[in-house]
Amino acid sequence: MNTVFIGGSRHVSRLPAPAKERLDNIIKSGFHIVVGDANGADKAVQKHLSGIGYADVEVFCSGDVCRNNLGDWPTRKVQPAKSVKGFQFYAAKDREMAQAADFGLMIWDGKSPGTVLNVLRLIKAGKKAVLLNSTEAKTTTFKAISDWEAFLAHCEAGLKTDLQERATPAEWALQGAPQPDLLDLAKASSALPEPAGLDLDVEINQALGAGDSRRVVELLGTIARDHGMSQVAKDSGLARESLYRSLGSDGNPEFATVLKVLASLGLTLTTTRAA
């Protein structure tokens, strides 16, 4: 099943006709929809989906409080680092949705840098994105970083500055450099080194020894995302969407799932007698 990330600007309180048309086509196709919990476009999309009783929706939020969930759908609570605040706090859920989706539809007010950054996150993950400018009834389709660079070349200087200031260094790193086909990035991600300073064996063993199942799931989710969830899904034989749910902040994976994920990451589970 395809997953669509639908997002947009907080100043878009009503969906323009072209957005409704695309949204209705997504619904007719029976796609799984992931959407944020913010006011503005997120809430307008939720209202449209709730109004027709569409059930295949998941609402993402940053932190423990979900601001809007008009259809009482399942939620995924993304936990940013404790030191993260402001824009980056709420951007945490957007990054998760960009990874979880197969493609995205962004409903833009023509000014918001956050909405445009979601396009960048999607195409860097090898996903197709459509940016619908609600003020001009104009759509732009992005399939590769070259499309992003062409779009950026026509943006006002102020928007470019805002984009770079709000993007993380990793998100902005591809700008201005020759790039491989973005569809190959997911394959390459499995060869990336583990995060510096993270002794995975020790961390997981400590959590297992303490009986801290939540910490085990949290660590497995972090490692899986670092390797690339698509690659982990392929290696483990598990569905990617299922992995995101199982290894998310509210995940409670079956033991068989844990073993398959460990094996796909090159890790094994051993036991010893307690002293």
Image (tube, rainbow, N blue to C red):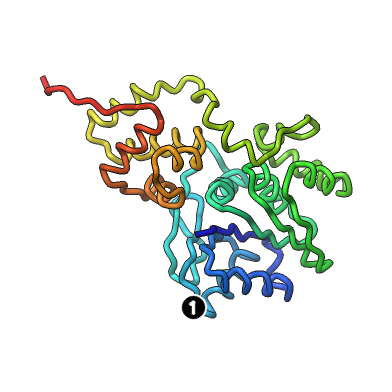
Residue 260 or 94: which is nearer the viewer? 260
Residue 132 location (% of width, % of height):
75, 62
Q: Is residue 3 left or right of residue 112?
A: left
Q: Is residue 184 left or right of residue 273?
A: right
The reply to whether residue 36 is in sight is no
Looking at the image, residue 36 lies above or below residue 262: below
Q: Is residue 258 left or right of residue 167?
A: left
Looking at the image, residue 171 lies above or below residue 41: above
Mark 1 neighbour class, 10 Å CA radius: few under 14, some 14 to 19, many 20 or more = few
Q: Residue 129 is drawn in which quadrant?
A: bottom right
Q: Residue 199 is drawn in which quadrant?
A: top left
Residue 156 location (% of width, % of height):
88, 48
Quadrant that contains the C terminus: top left
Count every numbered label the image shows and give the total: 1
Q: Which residue is mark 1?
A: 53
SS label for mark 1: loop
Residue placed at 41% from the left, 51% from the top?
242
Residue 96 location (% of width, % of height):
53, 47
Residue placed at 29% from the left, 26% from the top?
205
The reply to whether residue 253 is in sight is yes
Residue placed at 64% from the left, 44% from the top?
126
Residue 230 location (% of width, % of height):
50, 42
Residue placed at 35% from the left, 40% from the top?
217
Residue type indicated by callout 1: Gly
